[in-house]
Every structure is written in C-alpha cells, then in structure tokens.
Image (cartoon, rainbow, N blue to C red):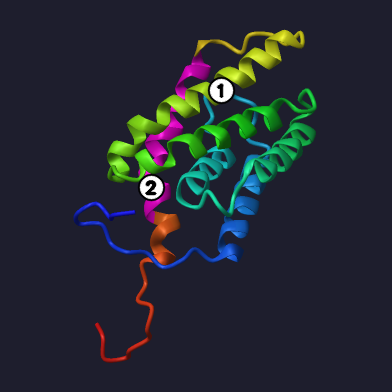
C-alpha cells in the first residue's frame, strides 16, 4: 500500500502492548463510576482503534470475548456487548483502509458512524430484551468516543514512532 504524503512509517505494534492496552481499557470500564448513558466506552474505543490499525492482530473473536466480560461485569444480557463489539470489529475491518488515509482529526468523522452503530446495537438489544430506554443523553457517548479518537491515536501510536535503531548520538 502506498503511504499518504507526510505520514511517518511506523514500527510494527508489539502484541504485548496491544493486549495490555485492551486489558487496561477493560479495567477502566469496570470501575464503579456509576452507569450514566453518556459515558464513553473506552474498551469500544480501543477495540476500534486496534481494529483499524492492526486488523490482523485484533479480530472479531477477541472483541466477542471482551464483550462477554463486559456483559458479565455489567449484569447485562449475555451477549449484548459481545454482539455490539463483534459488529464494530466487522465495521472496522471493512473500512480500515479508507480510514487510514485521513489524519486522526479527520478520522473522527469516519469513526463516529461506527461508534453510533455500535451504541444503536446495544440499545436495540437492550430494548428488545425488556430493558428501559436510557434517555436521549446516550447520543452523546458516540460523539465523546469520536472526540477521544485523536488522543487515542497519539498515545497508542507513540511506541511505534520511536527510532528502529538505538543511536546515542541521535537527538
């Protein structure tokens, strides 16, 4: 694939770093912060990020397993988050080549649709299983997740931007 002009060639992502970031996001989602509908789902954000940047390392099975963990932790319908995360990874697999052509700021506009679709699946499954409508404030969550996308890109791609050869004379 031809690199877009001005983009830096990145080192390969460390699988341990990918796994640690997903476990950290899962732990953050499990914090007892209260269940507010507008709270951004950090695990959803990181799954989407690694699904776009490393589609061969993070697959639908990983998303499904992490979704089951979220279902158990939140006492949700078993499979609700798993289905939504699997659909998200399917969407990132279909769009990752197009999204990578944009800078992180412009990628937010590409990703807000995937985040909204994932939250719509969560809402639809919750309502079909007899849950109550959480209110219109839940529309803020996909926007907040999209707003966090450039920050996640900057933080999670930082280890890949380092120099491949260690030279003490290099500044």
Q: Tell me if residue 130 is in the magenta stretch.
A: no
The magenta span reads: 137-154
Asked if residue 146 is positioned above or below residue 151 in the image, the reply reads: above
Q: Residues within 10 Å of mark 2 (few under 14, many from 20)?
A: few
Tell me residue 74's x, y (percent).
74, 31
Q: Are marks 2 and 1 in contact (CB under 8 Å)?
A: no
Asked if residue 69 is positioned above or below residue 37 in the image, the reply reads: below
Q: Quadrant of the N terminus?
A: bottom left
Tell me residue 54's x, y (percent).
50, 52
Q: Which residue is mark 2?
A: 151
Determine the residue located farthest toward the left in the rendered image: 5
Give the alpha-carbon distance from disc 2 to disc 1, as whole Å: 21 Å
Q: Residues within 10 Å of mark 1 (few under 14, many from 20)?
A: many
Is 148 left, or right, of 48 in this rendering?
A: left
Q: Which residue is mark 1?
A: 119
Sequence-first tag of 2 and 1: 1
Tell me where residue 65 sits by quadrant. Answer: top right
Tell me where residue 96 sits by quadrant. Answer: top left
Determine the residue located farthest toward the bottom in the rendered image: 169
Q: Nearer the viewer, residue 18 or 74?
A: 18
Q: Nearer the viewer, residue 60 or 171?
A: 60
Query: Visible in this render: residue 41?
Result: no
Tell me where residue 78 sits by quadrant. Answer: top right
Query: Residue at the spot x=57%, y=37% of the render?
Result: 89
Q: Tell me if residue 143 is in the magenta stretch.
A: yes
Q: Main secondary structure of the magenta part?
A: helix
Query: Residue at the spot x=41%, y=40% of the render?
Result: 148
């Amino acid at each position: 694939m031809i690199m877009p002009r001005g983009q830096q060639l990145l080192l390969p992502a460390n699988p341990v770093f990918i796994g640690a970031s997903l476990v950290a996001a899962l732990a953050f989602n499990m914090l007892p912060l209260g269940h507010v509908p507008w709270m951004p789902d950090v695990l959803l954000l990181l799954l989407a990020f690694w699904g776009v940047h490393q589609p061969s390392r993070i697959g639908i099975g990983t998303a499904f397993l992490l979704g089951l963990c979220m279902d158990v932790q939140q006492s949700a319908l078993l499979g609700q988050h798993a289905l939504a995360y699997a659909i998200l990874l399917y969407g990132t697999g279909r769009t990752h080549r197009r999204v990578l052509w944009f800078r992180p700021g412009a990628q937010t506009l590409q990703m807000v649709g995937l985040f909204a679709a994932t939250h719509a699946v969560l809402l639809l499954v919750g309502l079909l299983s007899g849950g109550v409508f959480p209110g219109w404030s839940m529309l803020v969550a996909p926007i907040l997740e999209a707003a966090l996308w450039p920050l996640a890109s900057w933080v999670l791609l930082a280890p890949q931007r380092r120099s491949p050869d260690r030279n003490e004379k290099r500044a």
